[in-house]
Amino acid sequence: MQPIDVVISWVDGNDPAHKSKIQPYLSTKVRKSEDIAGPTRYGSVGEVFYCVASIYRFAPFVRKIFIITDNQNPNLDTFIQQNFPESTIQIEIIDHAVLFRGYEQFLPVFNSRTIETCTFRIPDLSENYVYFNDDFFLARPVQPEDWYCDDRIVAYGHWRNIILDKLLWLIKPLKNGHKPVGFKDSMLLSALKLKRKWTYFHLEHIPHPLKKSVLEVFFTKNQELFLSNISYKFRSAKQFNTQALYYLLMFEANRAILTPTKNVFLYLKPVRRGANYITRKLNTFEQQKAIKFCCMGSLDMATEADRNELLLWLQRLLKIEF
């Protein structure tokens, strides 16, 4: 079996040094735009501890976890030693200066889409690597086959119609003087960059199995796309989603296995939901034994009670102590 690494992008937006660094670049327009540079883009309530713990607990075959940071460190060593003393998984912090070596003119960067375009450039990264946001969690044991099957990947998601979604984008209302920069829009743009006319691949907030060589070869041949996508300090409607583009490349090469997310993925966003929202979601998890992947979006914006309830649930699920 080829080694499998994990890459996690992480930022602590509460860090005074980070706040000081971002301040000079925040125009009035950017400050007002939650979709571009709102606090929740950088907020952290310790999700990375649970994210990493879920990999140690449920994917012990992983070789190495690379955590991408901007001159920060989540300081996980004591936590890992306390909870997983026998594990052989290594953790390495990758600074933006390393990720953007040779392209330092684009630093500093406060944009996950820019960062995601560069993940394949991590030194010592294995050919097979799985990309996580820090609010992604494994919720039950996974096997390498949940991500890779020989030379193919397991592509969790579904197909959408390009023409229909372009029309939906055209009628999208403005907010703060611009159309909100949407997750779906970046996937649509990925397809358009590849000159696709009819369908594009819609992925979820779920770990993405990537192959380093595929991105390396594509961006070497399409340097202008690479440079364009890494040139934005903040999220932009002109940026494509690198993972979505990669999935399309893999489908076109017949190296992707289309797999629905419905039965394996639990998404929670406990913000302005009904009183029984969390209870319903956790009941769904208990009832659907195939669920392996979980994302908890915008935990920093949840009420303290809801946030504590979810983190305590994760703590019990992962059998960890702080």
Image (tube, helix red, strand yellow):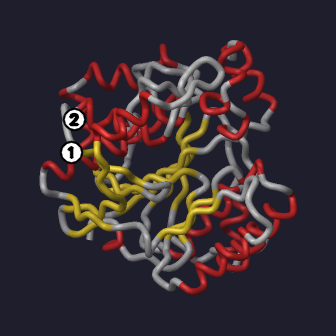
Q: Nearer the viewer, residue 71 or 288?
A: 288
Q: Nearer the viewer, mark 1 or mark 2?
A: 1
Q: Extreme right residue here?
A: 305
Q: Which mark is residue 249?
A: 1
> Which mark is first along the chain, 2 or 1?
2
Q: Nearer the viewer, residue 203 or 69?
A: 203
**Mark 2: few, some, or many residues within 10 Å (few <14, many ≥20)?**
some
Element under disc 2:
helix
Check whether the beta carbons of the residues at disc 1 and disc 2 lie within 8 A of each other: yes
Image position, residue 187 (x, y; %) = 37, 40
Image position, residue 166 (x, y; %) = 35, 33
Residue at point 65%, 38% (across, down):
41
Residue at point 63%, 74% (across, down):
84
Image position, residue 256 (x, y; %) = 22, 59
Q: Which residue is mark 2?
A: 218
Element under disc 1:
helix
Residue 132 vertical position relative to residue 306 in the rendered view, above or below: above
Say what amino acid the circle numbered 1 marks: Leu
Image position, residue 3 (x, y; %) = 33, 63
